[in-house]
């Protein structure tokens, strides 16, 4: 597989736009699909307006695609309700187009691992509603692939960091039919990460620990806090994603976290200055 043919990216958030730009830079013909036109769109990227929940609209937006990328997401507090219909719309669009479907997933479906590094063959043993939703969507993808209805490549990341790895799955035939953990910066503690941020902003970053019981109590009034309480296990044990499979197959050139933090802080300052804050 090469960069040739039409690559259709569903979703124009931070991941989708970065991916579309990356694919265009590789010389691919790229179309981005979302309900509303993004404010910033690379000149070489076509845009189509469509709601992925509308199966016919999604299929029309993906017409002629050789590769379809699922980079849509749903509001955090309404995942179980709103995410599966989006997912199914993109899957159906890829099937109708006869295209490879490259989908971006997080690692919620694994559930707690007791601190063991996560590998692609780890069972999907989610204990949360979001995790079970994610696992069910993965099951639908694998079932469609097994039935011959879709060619699928799944990329999983603990943090969505950079577009190069996901583009690889859509441009290399070796990726098809498999799950891949996408490489990212080195694993470190939250405290070490905040120390990097503190060094860039020039002042200490204060950390306060909220006891689980308090977090659950806050969730009685706040859907967001309820969602955070549900996923609290990610912060209570080592959370390590093993990316050796991807790196062995495709290699990797990951931006070190210190550089990424510096670039992010610089970007934020630019945005804040532009808004007069």
Image (cartoon, rainbow, N blue to C red):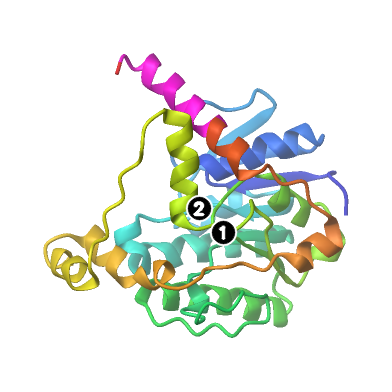
Disc 2 from disc 1: Cα separation? 9 Å
- Residue at x 76% of width, y 32% of height: 25
Residue named by callout 2: 72
Look at the image and say whether residue 269 sits in the magenta stretch: yes
Q: Is residue 133 above or below residue 78?
A: below
Q: Does the CB distance between marks 2 and 1 fall below 8 Å?
A: yes
Q: Quadrant of the N terminus?
A: bottom right
Disc with the residue nearer the chain's start (2 vs 1): 2
- Residue 79 position within the rendered picture, expressed as x and y whole percent measured from the top left: 37, 64
Residue 37 visible in the current orientation: no
Choose mark 2 or mark 1, whichever is in front: 2
Magenta residues (range): 263-276
Q: Is residue 6 above or below residue 148?
A: above
Q: Main secondary structure of the magenta part?
A: helix
Q: Residue at x 67, y 68 (%)?
A: 242
Q: Which residue is mark 1?
A: 90
């Amino acid at each position: 597989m090469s960069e040739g043919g039409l690559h259709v990216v569903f979703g124009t958030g931070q991941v989708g736009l970065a991916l579309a730009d990356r694919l265009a830079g590789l010389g691919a013909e790229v179309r981005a699909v979302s309900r509303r036109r993004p404010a910033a769109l690379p000149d070489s990227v076509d845009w189509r307006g469509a709601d992925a929940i509308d199966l016919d609209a999604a299929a029309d937006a993906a017409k002629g695609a050789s590769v379809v990328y699922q980079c849509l997401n749903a509001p955090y507090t309404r995942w179980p309700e709103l995410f599966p219909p989006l997912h199914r719309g993109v899957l159906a669009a890829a099937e109708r187009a006869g295209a490879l479907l490259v989908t971006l997933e997080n690692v919620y479906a694994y559930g707690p691992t007791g601190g063991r590094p996560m590998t692609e063959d780890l069972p999907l043993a989610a204990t949360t509603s979001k995790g079970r939703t994610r696992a069910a969507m993965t099951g639908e993808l694998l079932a469609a692939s097994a039935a011959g209805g879709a060619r699928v490549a799944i990329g999983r990341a603990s943090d969505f960091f950079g577009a190069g790895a996901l583009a690889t799955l859509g441009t290399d035939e070796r990726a098809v039919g498999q799950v891949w953990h996408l490489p990212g910066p080195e694993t470190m503690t939250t405290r070490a990460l905040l120390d990097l941020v503190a060094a860039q902003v020039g002042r200490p970053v204060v950390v306060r620990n909220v006891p689980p019981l308090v977090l659950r109590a806050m969730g009685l009034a706040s859907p967001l806090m309820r969602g955070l309480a549900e996923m609290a296990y990610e912060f209570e044990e080592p959370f390590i994603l093993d990316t050796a499979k991807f790196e062995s197959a495709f290699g990797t050139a990951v931006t070190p976290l210190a550089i990424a933090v510096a670039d992010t802080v610089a970007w934020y300052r630019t945005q804040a200055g532009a808004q007069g804050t």
